[in-house]
Amino acid sequence: MTKPRPSDVGVLGFRYLGAHEVDELADLWGALHEQHTVTAPHLADIISAVSLDESWRRRRAQYMAWLADPDTMAVLAEKEGDLAGYAMVTVRENAQGSWDRGDRVAVVQTFAIDPEYTGTGVGSKLLEEVRRQIASMGIRDIEFSALATSAEDIRFLEQEGFRPFVTTMVCRVDGFGAQD
């Protein structure tokens, strides 16, 4: 039985997680993992999807490593005790290049919304909280990746003020040339 879908999430609470609380994110990661595999079938011939268990094992290890840095944020959005979504955000030094982006840039490594909360404003409110925290650190740019085939995610990001910046292309090392 699923919960009734709220049309407007209303007031959300935000909780900042430490490494000892990372396992709270497993179910939301699982939903995101499923969305990734459904959204990007065009990658199946060059990038093999892993099982949910293996995916979480890998991501959990990455979260633990990231959370060793005091600038990393794991922000959990909750509605009356229900986990609605989360963001894992790291901060990296920014090598100055063609654009003035400041000395440090925030990178949204994971942004997962419970499918039951899609379209309710959770994503916008969670992103607003992330922006507030990042701004308080004196950081002015946020990088946020989306699968190229996820029109819904890209549309959300554009509505939130993001613009395309870099396109990442992938292939197997032995897969090159126009004939492949």
Image: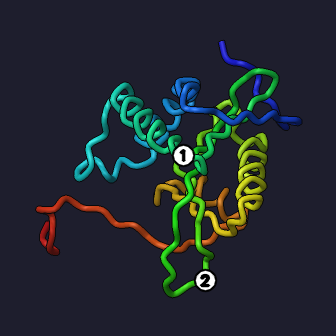
Q: Are marks 2 and 1 in contact (CB under 8 Å)?
A: no
Q: Is residue 134 left or right of residue 10?
A: left
Which of these two is toward me, 156 or 137? 137
Query: In the image, is residue 131 above or below residue 69?
Result: below
Q: Could you tell me residue 172's position as x and y percent?
A: 19, 59
- Counting labels gives 2
Residue tagged 1: 110
Colour logic? rainbow
Q: Secondary structure at mark 1?
A: strand
User: Residue 157's mark?
Assistant: none
Q: Quadrant of residue 163?
A: bottom right
Residue located 62% across and 63% down the image: 142
Residue located 60% across and 83% down the image: 100
Residue located 67% across and 40% down the image: 75
Q: Could you tell me residue 146's position as x and y percent?
A: 52, 56
Check disc 2 and give the amino acid type. Asp
Q: Could you tell me residue 3's position as x and y percent?
A: 72, 19
Q: Secondary structure at mark 2?
A: loop
Q: Viewer-nearest of labels 2 and 1?
A: 2
Query: In the image, is residue 111 above or below residue 33?
Result: below
